[in-house]
Image (spheres, grey):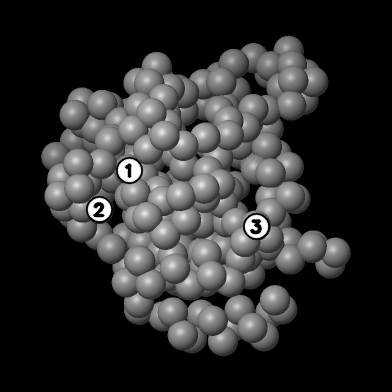
Amino acid sequence: MNAFDIASLQAELQGKNPRTILKTALANFENIAISFSGAEDVVLIDMAVKIRPDIQIFSLDTGRLHAETYQFIEQVRKHYQIEIELLSPDFHSLDSFVKQKGLFSFYEDGHHECCGIRKVAPLRRKLANLDAWITGQRKDQSLDTRSDIPEAQLDTSFSSAEQKIYKFNPLLNWSSAQVWDYIEAYQVPYNSLHAQGFISIGCQPCTRPVLPNQHERAGRWWWEDTAKKECGLHAANLKD
């Protein structure tokens, strides 16, 4: 599939419901996987396993996740009787980084270097063996970085001249309320941290609960500029 085809596919999928986008993605790509970490991703898993029971699913194990998140991953694995591939950082890169800068350098010089080692590099290794991936991104998660993303796209962050990687965002136009309505209606597992005020959940040192009426991403990298709140997995969302 080339860039012209993905443009046509995006025109076809624009504004469509999540199941339609998922079905189309799975129909067009055999070698495709769901990236799993949060509530949105489990909604996608719940939908996808009904279309393709053996859908590939992976999760980034940064080594800094909350204990509740690890329990959540195991809960999802057992609930759906699926395999979840855990992707770990390269030991040598991480060892060198921690020896040089310690465990909390991101509070001083930003989160991108740490996320690059713990999240982006493992994702890059995984995507090198895929043709496409499916994410739980929603537009209203960040008006600064996610308001313009499409349902289907060429992933310019991870594609190369030799290999094109495509990305699908089925929940793009859903609100948080719609995600949680689905979770309640279909009894979908969710991270117990949500009951403690966490909405958007990442690594333990970089995530905190949000206050009433605060935006859901306010608890992520709270010490940084709002417009920069992407870890690198969706770096193409960042505006110049």
User: Which residue is located at x 51 percent, y 56 percent?
Assistant: 134
> Where residue 121 sits in the image (x, y, percent)?
70, 39
Residue 99 position, x and y percent, is 73, 12
Residue 31: give its label. 3
Quarter of the rendering occupied by the C terminus: bottom right
The label number, if any, that marks residue 39 in the structure image: 1
Q: Earlier in the sequence, mark 2 or mark 3?
A: 3
x 44%, y 65%: residue: 22
Compared to residue 97, the image places residue 148 above or below, namely below
Residue 202 percent coordinates (x, y): 43, 33
Residues 58 and 237: in front is 58
Q: Nearer the viewer, residue 106 or 30?
A: 30
Q: Residue at x 36, y 61 (%)?
A: 171
- In terms of image quadrants, where is residue 162? bottom right
Q: Are marks 1 and 2 in contact (CB under 8 Å)?
A: yes
What amino acid is found at the position of numbered circle 3 in the picture? Asn
The label shown at residue 179 is 2
* Residue type indicated by callout 2: Val
Q: CA distance from mark 1 to mark 3?
A: 23 Å
**In terms of secondary structure, where does tag 2 sit?**
helix
Where is 58 relative to 17, above or below? above
Instruction: Name the spot of residue 199 as percent of width and height, x first.
Output: 28, 39
Q: State the CA–CA distance, disc 2 to disc 3.
A: 26 Å
User: Mark 1 belongs to which amino acid?
Assistant: Ala
Say which of marks 1 and 3 sits in front: 3
